[in-house]
Amino acid sequence: MRKKSTYCLLLAVLFMLSGTIMAGAESTRIPIKSNTRTLFQGFDMEFWTQNRNEGGLMTLTGGGTFTSEWEDVFNILFRMGKKFDNTQTYKDFGIITFDYAAIHEIHKGNVSYLCVYGWTRDPLVEFYVVDNYGSYNPGQAGVLLGVKEIDGGLYNIYEATRTEQPSIDGIRTFQQYFSVRADKRTEGVISLHEHFAAWEEFGMDMSGTMYEFALCVEGFRTSGYADVYKNIITFGDTVLGAEATREPLSRDGENGENGQNGENNVNGENGENGEYNANSENGENGAEPEPSGGGCFGGNGSASFVYLVASLGLLAFLAIKKKFLF
């Protein structure tokens, strides 16, 4: 009788521990309110606003997922992906895909993008694969080179030249490449390597070395909100974010119509004026930020899963060993 009581107590403790761990994973919320670039759970995240005193909030919710909100900003970018050391071209990575799902709302203005974003060096190129946007087409400031069907949709291919504008290397002149999806969407797979190959077909130089590719939400002279609740990145043999997909977060307040609203008209391009600051306060390889409510194990979803499996495995072992049935 005493042995059975002991096992019951152990069972209760292990299940409470598992519940605490999972609660910790669920409560991961790390707010970022100023220009920051750091490594977080295998992803390189970056919050960048052109005017540092502008209102924006990026909340990291684990494993590549995040929310973002901004109000009356000039230019702001929220990015979650990977940065590299400029030693590889896109062909060295093989297949590069983003399997994503998001809510993307524009509450004021009309210039906001849900996209895959990045840079190459030598030559210096800023690139976009835009799946959702407001009434302003982000490629219209450039030259339309053609149309390509990729991932079940038609993308218009544009190239533009930015003269003496902010870049990852300070004020420079560089090219911008755009793939803009005709039928907008907020979830699906973006095969980035296919866009790179398509750009080459249209004579766009993709010989540069890779600095970054990331899932990105951008706002320009707008107010809005986005919730990226799935962000699985595959490149070569690496897969990031596969176990971190979650449901969209509930929030109070006005809901937009996924980037369809807005009456303002701009002539502009992205990142109009001011110097791009490639180095954040936290630094290139800064320490990972602490979660604001991560439970007893800091809200690490992967660790939570491991502890839960280990706990249940121990229970099964005890049940078999002692013929304890529950």
Image (tube, rainbow, N blue to C red):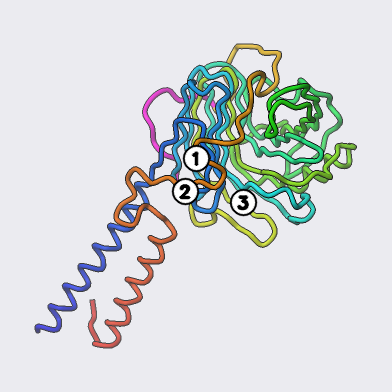
At a point 73% along the width and 34% down the height, the residue shown is 126
Q: Determine which residue is flagged by label 3.
A: 233
The quadrant of the rendering that contains the C terminus is bottom left
The image quarter in which residue 131 lies: top right
In the image, 47: left or right of 271? left
Tell me whether circle 1 and circle 3 mark residues in contact (CB < 8 Å): no
Q: Determine which residue is flagged by label 2.
A: 287
Badge 2 local density, few (<14 within 10 Å), some, or many (20+)?
few
Distance between mark 1 and mark 3 Cα atoms: 24 Å
Q: Determine which residue is flagged by label 1.
A: 282
Could you say which is closer to the camera, residue 70 or residue 149?
A: 70
> How far from the left and from the top, in percent, is residue 184?
65, 32
> How far from the left and from the top, in percent, is residue 242?
54, 56
List the single residue furthest toward the left.
Answer: 1
Q: The residue under label 1 is which amino acid type?
A: Asn
Q: The residue under label 3 is which amino acid type?
A: Ile
Task: Return the mark for residue 273.
Answer: none
Closest to the camera, between mark 1 and mark 3, is: 1
The quadrant of the rendering that contains the N terminus is bottom left
Badge 3 local density, few (<14 within 10 Å), some, or many (20+)?
many
Vertical order, 81 against 172 (above or below): below
The image quarter in which residue 110 lies: top right
Q: Is residue 249 magenta?
A: yes
Tell me whether circle 2 and circle 1 mark residues in contact (CB < 8 Å): yes
> How far from the left and from the top, in percent, is residue 318?
27, 82
- Comes first in the chain, label 3 or label 2: 3
Magenta region: which residues?
246-257
Q: Is residue 160 magenta?
A: no
> How far from the left and from the top, in percent, is residue 174?
78, 29
